[in-house]
Image (cartoon, rainbow, N blue to C red):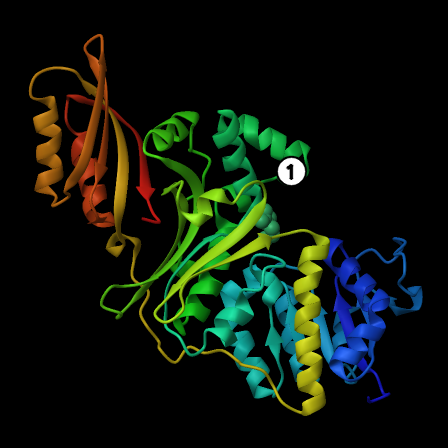
Amino acid sequence: MRTRPLKVALLGCGVVGSEVARIMTTHADDLAARIGAPVELAGVAVRRPDKVREGIDPALVTTDATALVKRGDLDVVVEVIGGIEPARTLITTAFEHGASVVSANKALLAQDGAALHAAAEEHGRDLYYEAAVAGAIPLIRPLRESLAGDKVNRVLGIVNGTTNFILDKMDSTGAGYQEALDEATALGYAEADPTADVEGFDAAAKAAILAGIAFHTRVRLDDVYREGMTEVTAADFASAKEMGCTIKLLAICERAADGASVTARVHPAMIPLSHPLASVRGAYNAVFVESDAAGQLMFYGPGAGGSPTASAVLGDLVAVCRNRLSGATGPGESAYAALPVSPMGDVVTRYHISLDVADKPGVLAQVATVFAEHGVSIDTVRQQGKDGEASLVVVTHRASDAALHGTVEALRKLDTVRGVASIMRVEGE
Ligand code: HSE
């Protein structure tokens, strides 16, 4: 084994960074044996230098992250500060000064992954980011390496633990959204401002990263259609149950049937209880992958938290350190397929639509005519009437999102349609 240690700098020492530092120390011998050289923590950039950080030599702590990444003797920079800046500049500076980078930064990878990969390649260094999607769950490496010989057609994931916790709570207790969110906040799953999670921004960043890797094509955050889950109601869960379904916030990345384009989207959807993703409870994450040769695969586990995320970071650190010792680099960006990303209107799926209508002769025929005029075929209709009003639940066959929305706009204009109570996509069938 080489005795000269590989030098690692840590940018950020919060929940994840402190766990990375702890495991680097407590597992030092095992890591050295697995890598073939010891790994030394050479510096830790933080915002608050006075905070006591157990197990970290105060002499290593600095507030000058820029000076740290410019040292020139670093082998690896681990970035766990998150956000776009200063993370982006620090990562590119690290490449310019000879270090490889391990990052957990989903927002940055989703927005600027191509530029960061280009910077890594220009300087002959690695950019690894297993921890950016679904915490501890091995997903980036299986997609980038294990499935590199296969053709992935679809990725369907629960990639946000906070929203899965809330939806699971609504499903199992009949609670409304606000009540379930309050519990998630009290238990520390939801942040004080839960917008990034409940509006689907966090999942959309992860969808962009997954779609890009799965389809060997560039998919940016702006390409991902996004709908949050704040409008999901207890009534939606009751309807889902009647259909033998539950509701999940899904990140869905698909290759079009003709293979000529891809789509990426995040929205709440009904999925059958028989689908493996339906059994993902609490704050857990899972990603279901469909490919030509392997068939169906599911990756499951904790998608957040200090230790789980640190596990993914450490796995990358070992891989990157091994590459450094062998003078090689791992796989870089693979975007050769360069497929266009189609808009949401082109997505084809099934829909569950709840309408409040007048209960009088001809209304059902009127509603059915609107669906027919837009080329949307009805699978089932269920009506429950009371005091001259009725609730009508229509489940469609597969139709384009554009056709469905044209249908709903036309339905809203009918005098006999009092309101559109909910529209929910049905996936995973
Ligand atoms: N806030 C995310 C979640 C974890 O709830 O899953 C980090 O991506």
Q: Looking at the rendering, in which quadrant would you find the N terminus?
A: bottom right
Residue 272 % position (x, y): 37, 42
Residue appearing at x 45%, y 77% in the figure: 148
Would you call the spot at circle 1 few (<14 residues within 10 Å), some (14-19), or many (20 or more)?
few
Name the foreground residue: 415 vs 282: 282
Residue 65 % position (x, y): 76, 69
Q: Is residue 297 above or below residue 317?
A: above
Name the foreground residue: 37 vs 345: 37
Q: Is residue 176 visible?
A: yes
Which amino acid type is shown beneath numbered disc 1?
Answer: Ala
Q: Is residue 367 above or below residue 46?
A: above
Left or right, 76 with respect to 362, comes to right
Count of marks overlaid on the render: 1
Residue appearing at x 55%, y 71% in the figure: 141
Kindly identify which residue carries mark 1: 192
Residue 186 % position (x, y): 67, 32
Q: Quadrant of residue 77?
A: bottom right
Question: As drawn, which residue projects farthest toward the bottom?
Answer: 327
Residue 51 % position (x, y): 87, 53
Q: Quadrant of residue 236?
A: top left
Q: Is residue 289 above or below residue 151?
A: above
Name the foreground residue: 213 vs 100: 213
Residue appearing at x 57%, y 40% in the figure: 282
Q: Is residue 63 visible?
A: no
Left or right, 48 with respect to 401, comes to right
Label 1 C-beta lies within 8 Å of the nearest ligand 1 atom: no
Left or right, 150 with respect to 189, comes to left
Residue appearing at x 33%, y 38% in the figure: 424
The kind of secondary structure element at disc 1 is loop
